[in-house]
Image: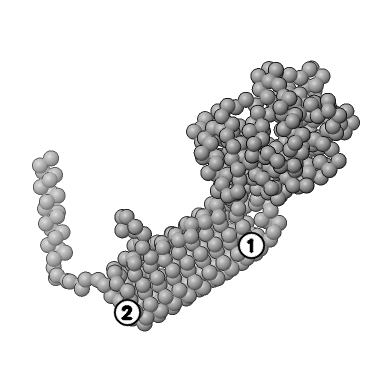
Amino acid sequence: MSAALIILAAGKGTRMNSELPKVLHPIGGAPMLHHAMRAGAALDPEHVIVVAGHGADQVRAAALAYDENAEVVLQEEQLGTGHAVDQAREVLKGFDGDIVVLFGDTPFLRPETLERMIATRQTHDVVVLGFEIAELQPRYGRLVMDGDRLVKIVEYKDASEDEQTIRFTNSGLLACDAKTLFEMLSETSNDNASGEYYLTEVAELANRRGLSVTAIACDQAETLGVDSRTDLAAADALFQTKARAELLGDGVTLVAPDTVYLSLDTVIGRDAVIEPNVVFGPGVSVESGATIRAFSHLEGCHVARGAIVGPYARLRPGTELAEDVRIGNFVEVKNATLAEGSKVNHLSYIGDASIGAASNIGAGTITCNYDGVMKHFTHIGERAFIGSNTMLVAPVSIGDEAMTGSGSVITSDVEAGALALARAPQVEKPGMARKLFEMLKAKKARMHRGS
């Protein structure tokens, strides 16, 4: 049976106190919406529909950034979860598979849980996901069960005193075939305390039809929603703890695990070593056996086997490090490829460049890639030696086995095997330093007398 995901992402998130739509606040460097879409991808859905409202253009851009085939529909008025799901009716016209409803602000749902929901759908018409709460709380709707039959879902504020004591509570997630779900949504009513159309009413409507309705349980942590900045910080901490544990289990050495920050898509190979206080932004992959030293920041880059980065290094998007490359302290690399065995050991900026195998870049080297309007490229060949404090004014090419003298400003191509020097001759004026110091001291004395 084919599946369609409907991800509810229309809420403003008033308690976030932010112009940014709630589902776009990041956990592990990625919007919460991406976490939900990633979990849902385990079902290999035929359709992924995101219901947007507040900040719809931003939500649409984020959804398409994760899945270019996602479909975004607009809920102009927030009239409840049932109304939100109903916005997908036209997009799914003619679709005869299962619909699975997710929430864009519930980032920890496990793919295995969704697979269990779909498996349960083979024997039941409607499947709701619930969880047991340890302490009674008024924020959750209650699942009223009769054996394995879900009789109804009741919002806490509409529940009787007995129903409020139920610990099996509603996550909001639901699976049902498309035709039946949309038929029942047409029958929902907003005659309730909030004046909204509840998706939860579907369970009771299904029972009236004589359909088989049930609820399965998951761990409460999977259903954790994010409604405030405090929730967001707690959710990110949970994500980090889980992601670090997975890396440790995969054979990655984290010298001080609690100090390493990971992103949703961080990939690190076995036997890599990650020293303290390293930040992995989005889009980073590190191969087995590489070392990332302390206080480095990586984003949008690839680090190959045996490479060493840092300490205090910054790798920006577009950086590709081949095997056994060395990037040392206070080096920044952006949109550059460094071939096998090349070295940039300290205090340098390499941007919009390629560096050949076994080349050495001296301290203080800068590829001057920006002219104030456009970016330009620097090419350095194999086994080249770039002297300390060299300015490479792009576009420029340095040939294989070429060398630049320290302190040079290179503005023209250097052929293979050549030595390039571009600095003014040293001029020495005997005694001038003493005369200059005397002049300056006298000037300072006059200034003090005048004050």
Relative vertical location of residue 336 with respect to residue 262 in this rendering, above or below: below
Kindly state the secondary structure of the residue where label 1 is placed.
loop
Q: Quadrant of the C terminus?
A: top left
Quadrant in which residue 52 is drawn: top right
Count of numbered tags: 2
Which residue is drawn at the image coordinates 75% and 43% (left, top)? 97
Residue 42, horizontal then vertical, whole percent: 71, 50
Which residue is drawn at the image coordinates 11% and 51% (left, top)? 443
Whether residue 412 sits left or right of residue 111 in the image: it is left
Q: Which mark is residue 269?
A: 1
Query: Which three-letter amino acid code belongs to the residue tagged 1?
Result: Gly
Relative vertical location of residue 193 with respect to residue 44 in this rendering, above or below: above
Decide which of 326, 438 is in the foreground and name it. 326
Quadrant in which residue 268 is drawn: bottom right
Decide which of 208, 353 is in the foreground and name it. 208
Q: Which mark is residue 419?
A: 2
Give the residue furthest to the right: 147
Decide which of 25, 212 is in the foreground and name it. 212
Residue 167, horizontal then vertical, whole percent: 79, 28
Residue 224, horizontal then vertical, whole percent: 68, 36
Task: Decide if residue 150 is in sight here.
Answer: yes
Query: Which three-letter amino acid code belongs to the residue tagged 2?
Result: Leu
Give the residue furthest to the bottom: 417
Decide which of 321, 85 is in the foreground and name it. 85
